[in-house]
Amino acid sequence: MDLITAITIFALAIFIGFEIITKVPPTLHTPLMSGSNAISGITLVGAILAVRSGSGFFGALLGFIAIVFAMVNVVGGFLVTHRMLEMFRKKG
Amino acid sequence: MLDTLSHWLVFAQEGPSLVPAGTNEAADVVDELAHAAAVGPWANLAYLIAAILFIRGIKGMTHPRTAVRGNLTGALGMLLAVVVTVWQLGLLPLGVAIVGMALGAVAGYVMATRVQMTQMPQMVGLFNGFGGLASLLVVGAETHTHFAGAANVSEAACAAGVTGLIGAVTFTGSMVAAGKLQELDMFRKPWSFPGQRVANAVLLLSCLGLTFLMLGGHGWAYILIVLLAGVLGVLLVVPIGGADMPVVIALLNSYSGLAASAAGFVISNNVLIIAGSLVGASGLILTGIMCRAMNRSLAHVLFGKLQAAEDAPSADDVYAGKIKATSAEEVAMLLDGVQRVVIVPGYGLAVAQAQHAVRDLANLLEDRGVTVEYAIHPVAGRMPGHMNVLLAEADVPYDQLKEMDEINPTMSQADVAIVIGANDVVNPVADTDPKSPIAGMPIIHADQARTVVVIKRSLSPGFAGIPNPLFAADNCLMLFGDGKQVMVELIAALKEAA
């Protein structure tokens, strides 16, 4: 993938982000933040790729630590968001 | 370790190479590459689907009715992306990865299920930091293994430098923010030193300069970038005071996404770029909302100081002889026979953990036919939406939570406004004194209610450090004490009077 393609994807995704999140009701500010934060744990994909063979010991070690932290981010983030949203929903 | 270091250092001479020198490992890698090439297009299609699920998920998160499904949609996208990645690697050599994922999943599960709602700001801060750390480690591993997978070393090196910078700032900045929110002693007081802005600029420029070194093939520069940016993250957040935390948390949220996106540039992975930039955009929007709610620019929140004007009235001038302290019994009598009560919560509510007691009071009033509403200022509390989460935990129906713009036109029709643990967000000076540090900040017009009851420990100023004329107003009664304790007394007094 060349740089221009990557930048194109990046720029379009930023615009999609701005367009779909037009007005966030304040009720959802915190869940939106923790939920989107869980999505930023997508770096987990990069971490898994980093421990593939050929990374050497040091590369695999960094990848391993990255997997642990990204996974905390993903599991913790989605779960805590769900907990909050359930509180909002039960008397909606 | 020496071997490792030399690995980084020889990078300049070797240039990019997908196959490392070790011979038996090389055979594995060739197999793996063949497999990856065969499944590559399918994997990328699956990543596209994951990205679409993320977009649908985030869109869902912007409406209360669709939020739960939105969150689950995002989680589904994540599951898909991870499964496809594992499949792309041919299901081997997953031993280590599985252990890491299990460790992280257990830690994440325990943290997410044990956390109290009042601790949510520091929790979100921690998770932001972990995301940034993971991204910078991924790129560290990738830099170490010669930018394998990138089409062009120089572009990848540039993106790697940026990931190191953003990732490290996100990590250390979030740790400091979480420490402040947890009120750890070492972060209790905001501190700064002369020339801090210069130091920040030097650190930032050094990181960019080191990125150029990486462009020249010096992989070791990455370590320095991470260290310097780590210091920068600390210096950026340490001087920022409590009430500005909503802005900082939202901004770090954005950074954690941008770090993931930059990491996507390094490893040429679409789903990282897309998901990361969505989060980056969402965090920036929240940051903007928070800044507007304080009528301050982002630069002013990050680098400016709130300072009262020289000729501003002192607390003695404002309060002397005009403060009317009241008692729970008196307020209970006041609440007898009213029709509409508006509760204005602030950070003090969270500190006192008074949300359940407030709800009990509201229930009691509603049983007597009183309309109870809550006026929520966008920056009340320590993170965006803090008050909403606390009150939702206490089972307050969310249609009773009114936004500032919605409730202000009707404040004059409220019989009683109960301000609990809020100060600057109800300070009328924002409208009346153009020289005040909070001039122009939109406030909740509690002062327009027929009677205002302010529940507060003392007359100490809020974050802006200025006296609040509301407390001395003719229609204002001060009920001094701990928020929760006062609420309990108030409920008892109301029941007794009935």
Image (cartoon, helix red, strand yellow):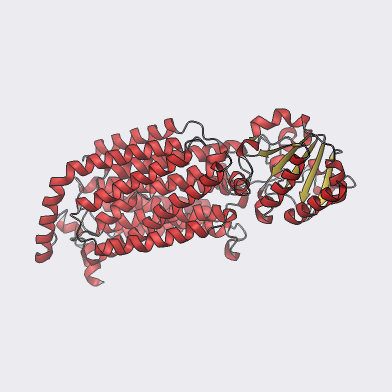
Residue B492 placement (x, y as % from top left): 81, 53
Between B486 and B149, the residue placed more toward the observer is B486
Residue B154 vs residue B471: left or right? left
Q: Residue at x 86, y 51 (%)?
A: B496
As drawn, which residue projects farthest toward the top? B409
Residue A56 vs residue B335: left or right? left
Q: Residue at x 72, y 33 (%)?
A: B431
Between B290 and B8, the residue placed more toward the observer is B290
Query: Which image quadrant for residue B42?
Result: top left
Q: How many marks?
A: 0
Residue B427 sits above or below residue B142 on the image: above
Residue B173 placement (x, y as % from top left): 48, 55
Q: Residue at x 59, y 41 (%)?
A: A91
Look at the image and tell me in which quarter the N terminus of chain B lies: bottom left
Residue B75 placement (x, y as % from top left): 38, 46
Residue B328 vs residue B116: left or right? right
Residue B484 placement (x, y as % from top left): 73, 55
Residue A2 sits above or below residue B457 on the image: above
As drawn, which residue projects farthest toward the right? B321
Residue B487 sits above or below residue B104 on the image: above
Between B68 and B151, the residue placed more toward the observer is B68
Query: Which image quadrant for residue B188?
Result: bottom right
Q: Is residue B237 visible?
A: yes
Q: Residue at x 42, y 56 (%)?
A: B130
Query: Which image quadrant for residue B271?
Result: top left
Q: Is residue B384 visible?
A: no
As drawn, which residue projects farthest toward the bottom? B2
